[in-house]
């Protein structure tokens, strides 16, 4: 597909002056609907796009200037409104929201100002190439091999896979600059974009031209596109494949498409698409998913859709998930790793929420539950400990006083993956320990996506299942980012009872800025006893524990509550009077 560039002439000069004189509101508009036709030519690495988009003014004032951005490896050809060409000015825009580290930005003058929440439909056309490009990573010092295994998106003859915004802007977006070298900048920009376009719809028609002996598999966010057709062009060996992909609402992850010569292994719970030579690993993955499926169903009721896994050719490639779709290398047939991945993926297939701390937090929580079932609680806590370090680093990094940033960094608002994935996993685990497994299952089963109108919806469902006062917990862990607790034994006193046992009185101090219900473990010759104690932030609490023989050691926390300091969690009792 070829397009002609609209001549901008004198307008380009005028618009350049305008851009330099005024600050553009790049996030004033969101795309409420995409209806695009893609022409993919793998042998040329080319992508051509034409179609219609509906812009919605999300700002508080009428807007006559709109900004549209695509990958810097693509070029704008035309923009029309009501079949009339619009004047527009294009310029490069440095941003790490695209793998090239830049965007091709079109600044449009609309026929008339669009009122707040008003919409305008545009007809667009652009084209270019999508090559393997990890510029945004290599320019900040990432080794080339590691960078290429992370930003593996490309259109190529052997394999085509292109993720969306955050990786490749192959469809129009509108964002402020995102910079990987500036802390959480990329995730903040991407988070705002996802929030603005939550519920937007995308309709795709894909046409692929290449030398194919058989029809390649086409996936868009895990959905096999119906309406596949396959024909030869004239007498040549070039084949033309077309597919209509049904309109679907965007989820937390940006739309992605994959074209490959896959083999398909289908099971009731999962569909695994694998490359030649990877049949054993695909079977292992499918078997693991089938074993995990009934367990996931106990927690998240029936599946909404079948999970889908698709193979990546680079064995070192970073995995990517989009809802119930998982793109991952299937070069290994390690069943334990497959079971862990399947638990996460099947949770997404069963449970949907537009709130990251719920959707991603529950998926990671399910992985910990899987490990607990397979190997016991210590193995699950060890896995969670790997995540604790990641979000602990985020908690420690702040450029403003925590009191000024508690709401922005909270689970209900954060754009940090470490927080809404890893910290949220801990929150779900702590809630299970506090209110019990049966009660938490009932709260999850009561969740309805269409009824989730405010941040307190899920906490209310949980609170309704228990007599516990949980408001303090949600304030410290969900609605606000109050940091982490820090527990230590301030004092312990033991006395022998008339029946020969020992009554141990423990005063526990929480030096941290968040409260929690923490396990208290008393060890003695021949065993240990565990109790739970609620200790609010910057407060103390007392617990009495009866043990059959003289207590020897107190251990605060078994790893189920994330702390800022775990070096002070053990207390020896040798010197305590009996």
Image (spheres, rainbow, N blue to C red):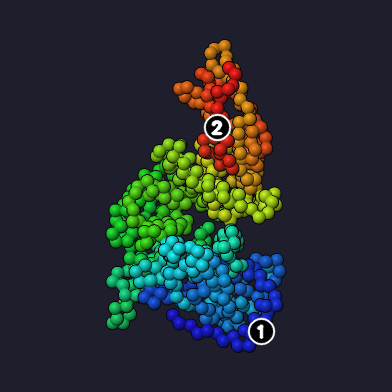
Quarter of the image where one finds residue 117: bottom right
Residue at the spot x=45%, y=55% of the render?
324
User: Residue 455, how many percent across, how many down?
Assistant: 63, 50
Disc 2 is placed on an element classified as strand
Residue at the spot x=66%, y=55% of the render?
399
Mark 1 touching mark 2, by CB under 8 A?
no
Q: Nearer the viewer, residue 148 or 459?
A: 148
Q: Which residue is mark 1?
A: 14
User: Residue 334, how many percent across, how many down?
Assistant: 34, 49
Compared to residue 95, the image places residue 389 above or below, namely above
User: Residue 378, how many percent across, how many down?
Assistant: 45, 37
Q: Earlier in the sequence, mark 1 or mark 2?
A: 1
Q: Which residue is mark 2?
A: 570
Residue at the spot x=58%, y=35% of the render?
568
Disc 1 is placed on an element classified as helix
Compared to residue 16, the image places residue 331 above or below, namely above
Quarter of the image where one finds residue 23: bottom right
């Amino acid at each position: 597909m070829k397009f002609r560039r609209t001549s901008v002439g004198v307008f380009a000069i005028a618009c350049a002056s305008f851009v330099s004189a005024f600050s553009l509101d790049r996030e004033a508009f969101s795309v409420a609907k995409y209806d695009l036709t893609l022409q993919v030519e793998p042998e040329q690495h080319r992508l051509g796009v034409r179609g219609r988009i509906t812009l919605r003014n999300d700002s508080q004032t009428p807007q006559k200037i709109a900004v549209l951005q695509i990958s810097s490896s693509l070029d704008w050809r035309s923009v029309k409104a009501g079949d009339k060409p619009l004047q527009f000015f294009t310029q490069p825009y440095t941003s790490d929201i695209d793998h090239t580290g830049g965007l091709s930005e079109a600044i449009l003058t609309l026929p008339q100002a669009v009122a707040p929440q008003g919409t305008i439909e545009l007809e667009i056309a652009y084209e270019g190439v999508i090559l393997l490009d990890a510029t945004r990573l290599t320019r900040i010092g990432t080794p080339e091999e590691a960078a290429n295994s992370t930003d593996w998106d490309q259109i190529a003859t052997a394999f085509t896979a292109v993720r969306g915004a955050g990786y490749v802007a192959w469809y129009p977006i509108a964002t402020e600059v995102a910079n990987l070298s500036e802390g959480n900048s990329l995730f903040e920009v991407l988070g705002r974009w996802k929030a603005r376009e939550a519920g937007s719809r995308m309709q795709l028609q894909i046409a692929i031209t290449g030398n194919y002996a058989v029809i390649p598999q086409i996936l868009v966010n895990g959905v096999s596109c119906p309406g596949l057709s396959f024909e030869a062009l004239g007498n040549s060996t070039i084949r033309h494949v077309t597919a209509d992909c049904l309109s679907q609402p965007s989820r937390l992850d940006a739309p992605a498409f994959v074209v490959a010569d896959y083999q398909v292994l289908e099971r009731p719970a999962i569909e695994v698409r694998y490359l030649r030579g990877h049949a054993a690993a695909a079977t292992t993955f499918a078997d693991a998913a089938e074993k995990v499926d009934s367990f996931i169903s106990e927690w998240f009721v029936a599946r909404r859709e079948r999970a889908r896994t698709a193979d990546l050719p680079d064995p070192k490639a970073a995995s990517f998930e989009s809802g119930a779709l998982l793109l991952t290398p299937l070069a290994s047939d390690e069943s334990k790793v497959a079971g862990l991945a399947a638990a996460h993926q099947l949770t997404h297939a069963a449970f949907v929420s537009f709130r990251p701390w719920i959707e991603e937090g529950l998926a990671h929580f399910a992985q910990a539950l899987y490990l607990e079932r397979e190997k016991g609680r210590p193995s699950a806590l060890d896995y969670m400990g790997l995540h604790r370090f990641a979000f602990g680093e985020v908690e420690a990094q702040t450029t403003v006083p925590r009191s000024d940033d508690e709401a922005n960094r909270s689970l209900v608002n954060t754009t940090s993956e470490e927080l809404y994935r890893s910290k949220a996993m801990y929150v779900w685990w702590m809630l299970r320990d506090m209110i019990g497994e049966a009660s938490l299952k009932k709260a999850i089963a009561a969740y309805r996506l269409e009824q989730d109108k405010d941040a307190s919806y899920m906490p209310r469902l949980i609170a309704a299942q228990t007599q516990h006062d949980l408001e303090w917990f949600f304030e410290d862990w969900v609605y606000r980012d109050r940091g982490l607790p820090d527990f230590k034994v301030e004092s312990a006193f033991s006395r022998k009872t008339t029946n020969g046992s020992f009554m141990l009185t423990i005063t526990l101090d929480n030096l941290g800025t968040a409260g929690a219900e923490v396990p208290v473990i008393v060890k003695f010759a021949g065993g240990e006893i565990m109790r739970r104690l609620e200790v609010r932030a910057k407060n103390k609490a007392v617990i009495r524990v009866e043990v059959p023989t003289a207590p020897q050691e107190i251990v605060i926390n078994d790893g189920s509550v994330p702390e800022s300091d775990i070096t002070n969690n053990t207390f020896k009792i040798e010197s305590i009077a009996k």
